[in-house]
Amino acid sequence: MDEIFGIPAPLLFGQLLLGLINGAFYAMLSLGLAVIFGLLNIINFTHGAQFMMGAFVAWMLLNWLGLGYWWALLLAPLIVGLSGVIIERTMISRLYKLDHLYGLLLTFGIGLIIEGVFRNYFGSSGLPYRPPAELQGGWDLGFMFMPVYRFWVVVFSLVVCLATWLMIEKTRLGAYLRAATENAALVQAFGVNVPRLITLTYGFGVALAALAGVLAAPIYSVNPQMGTNLIIIVFAVVVIGGMGSILGSVLTGFGLGVVEGLTRVFWPEASATVIFVIMAIVLVTRPAGLFGRA
Amino acid sequence: MADALADLPIAAQEGASPLLAVRGLEAWYGESHVLHGVTLDVHEGEVVTLLGRNGAGKTTTLRSIMGLVPKRSGSVHYAGRELIGARSDAIARAGIAYCPEERGIFASLDVTENLMLPPVVRPGGLPLETIYELFPNLKERARSQGTKLSGGEQQMLAIARILRTGAKLLLLDEPSEGLAPVIVQQIGRTIRELKQRGFTVLLVEQNFRFAQTVADRHYVMEHGKVVDMVRNEDLNASMDRLHEYLGV
């Protein structure tokens, strides 16, 4: 068990774990993007900034109000989600009658502004955020060292993705969401307040991004660019999984994280590009994405 | 032409104020002016059809009543409320339910989810057991994907799901379209059954032989206007006139 395919086992498993961690973030972020795109038909380019806001709100809660990680896990998604609701109500909702491109430009611009404001106030060097005492340390599994916090991130994000999927597939609210994704005008003609459903959906997608941001705060340093770096890959994940597919975005997120991790072991030079190579291949062979409906 | 129109018995003279009173309804799709002053009445418990050629404005009339046409003017008075400026969800909540021509069955929902989708807007809707008695197929196929049903079953589902909500006025857009004769008969029985249960129905039809089996009155539309009204009992006597309108 020391070597697998000529690779030292701890290195292989270490990269697999790292791949799963990255996959957890890809999954949560692309899930939010998929939910928003499904109903609003807008690719939310503010998503990376909202992920970063989640991490910063966690940092602010701790350093300004003394509220720790567990509070941040609850409050940061609510606070950032609320900011998303305001953005949708005051700005994005004005663009639904126009081409989707305008929504993309608007959310891209909002993202740049938010990142600029945070860079102005906090600089770009990054702020430390420690995991809570309960989640520090790690286990020696014999073949590798497993940090508790990283294990927690993978499990927690799996639970969040599963809960989101159940909510969308099995509840009445989820049925409204799926139906409105297909034909919003008819769902509204049945008496459902679709504009409010859209606002809440956007807020929910943004809250998911912020939740991922809180999870990320102890792993990556909290800095204004943390979303930008991640979100480019997440867009590729969404394209590969299929726009608007809920289950597809989760499976693709975790899957591509692992693929990326393995590439780092076997061909390190390609690890930064492997996802984009896969994206190109998928776009050529299955333009609707692996799980998308053509 | 204008003088002749003024004399037409557009409104039914039944004394009681109508459940639905449409007056001078105009509607636009973008730049094109589709409805040019539609006026009609539907009384409580009546089944009324809109007849007319393709493009006469029948579907647009239903969609305008339902608030689904972005630009409209005139008056849509329902159960004591003016609805011309209301949003479609408010119109639904006032007690009007709509079954679109393309049926609008959702592919990502199974049959039961499709059936349960429209929220209850007021008390008095049909209980689920009654709906399953009327449409036994829907119970058998409860877990099927909505769009995997046959055309007839989809039409049954599209009608069934608006019966639960407590809406009293049903707007049905060509429920007989594209269906086998035996299914059309079944839809006809269903509409008569709904009338007995106290529903009021405004029905768009091309097939006036079918309309004759279910309706109390018929409005004829041409070029975005109501041009004539025929009571069902006078239908046979008015055949020549209708043939001219409908070009059959």
Image (cartoon, grey):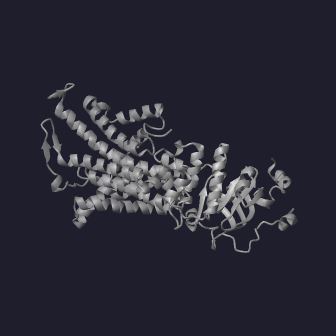
B80 sits left or right of B210 in the view: left
Q: How many marks?
A: 0
Q: Is residue A120 or residue B204 the one in the foreground?
A: B204
Q: Residue furthest top?
A: A6
Which quadrant of the view contains residue A73?
bottom left
A98 sits left or right of A177 in the view: right
Q: Position of residue B47 (x, y in %)?
A: 68, 61
Visible in this render: residue A125?
no
Q: Residue at x 39, y 57 (%)?
A: A204
Establish if B23 lies above or below A136.
Answer: below
Q: Residue at x 65, y 57 (%)?
A: B192
Which quadrant of the view contains residue B32?
bottom right
Visible in this render: residue A203?
yes
Point out the image quarter for the N terminus of chain B: bottom right
Q: Position of residue B152 (x, y in %)?
A: 60, 45
B248 sits left or right of B172 in the view: right
Q: Is residue B244 or residue B237 the one in the foreground?
A: B237
B114 sits left or right of A247 in the view: right
Q: Is residue B51 or residue A260 the one in the foreground?
A: B51
Establish if B88 lies above or below B158.
Answer: below
Q: Residue at x 49, y 49 (%)?
A: B139
Q: Residue at x 87, y 66 (%)?
A: B3
Q: Position of residue A112 (x, y in %)?
A: 41, 53
Q: Is residue A102 or residue A255 the one in the foreground?
A: A255
Q: Position of residue B154 (x, y in %)?
A: 57, 47
